[in-house]
Image: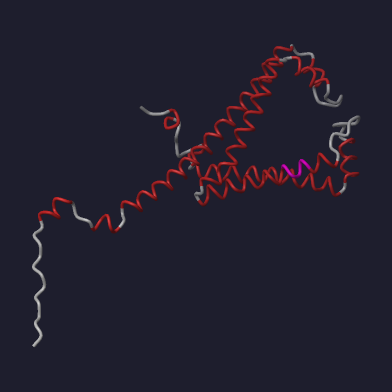
Amino acid sequence: MISPWDRWYSTSCCLCCHVRTGTIILGIWYMLINAVVLLILLSALNDPIQYRYHLTSSELGTDIDVMDDANICIATAISLLMILICGMATYGAYKQHAAWIIPFFCYQIFDFALNTLVAISVVVYPNTVQDYLQQLPGTFPYKEDIMSTNNMCLVFAVLLFIGCILSFKAYLIGCVWNCYRYVSGRGTTEVLVYVTTNDTTVLLPPYEEAVAIPPKDPPPQYMEA
């Protein structure tokens, strides 16, 4: 009987590329995104007055100072940690070290769980969508038109959007998991091949043949003159 894990196992992912290649591309993509975020945060730490000016001029938050120095430092540390985790996954997939892929896989599971909780909160508390729209700035495009829409339609649209994101994230989780299984299985196969091709195992004849072979005559003894 085929287990569910083996049924969904595949060595190919989107664009018909190998799961190792897909994991390497995914790790590099996450590293680039976090590197851009890290540069923005470092520039905010370097010149906080100019950063707050751009933040208030864009009317993203004129009443509340959403990002102080402590929050920027925490976000910077998180970005550095994410770059390290994505780099480990990329190196592990390239060098075929399965243990290096596990932290990135755990991050994917954690991110998927958070998005699932957001979807559940929208279903349980549908009025949160309207509350979130009311907190948006007045210059947000089509804010009044969106708020005039039926609440159930808004909830359905939000759930459809989150569902598409969750499906895509689940597919990426499956690709990374298949890469981990491929790399770990390849390492196990190499160990088994080494054991079966050991010289001592190949040189030993079967028991029946060893019994059937007659003993050889002892070498002649040379007597001293």
- Left or right side of 215 for 113: right
| Residues drawn in magenta | 74-78
From the image, which quarter does the N terminus lie in?
top left
Relative to 210, residue 32 above or below: above
Residue 106 placed where, x, y %? 59, 37
Residue 135 placed where, x, y %? 83, 23
User: How did the renderer colour the structure?
Assistant: secondary structure
Q: Residue at x 71, y 16 (%)?
A: 154
From the image, which quarter does the C terminus lie in?
bottom left
Q: Residue at x 50, y 41 (%)?
A: 180
Q: Residue furthest front?
A: 224
Residue 214 placed where, x, y %? 8, 60
- Left or right side of 82 for 173: left
Image label count: 0
Relative to 13, residue 196 above or below: below
Near-viewer residue (142 or 120) = 120
| SS assignment for the magenta stretch, majority | helix
Residue 51 placed where, x, y %? 87, 42
Which image quarter: residue 48? top right
Q: Residue at x 69, y 19 (%)?
A: 121
Near-viewer residue (140 or 155) = 155
Q: Residue at x 53, y 47 (%)?
A: 93
- Left or right side of 143 for 34: left
Near-viewer residue (104 or 168) = 104
- Left or right side of 223 for 187: right
Is residue 178 one of those drawn in magenta?
Answer: no
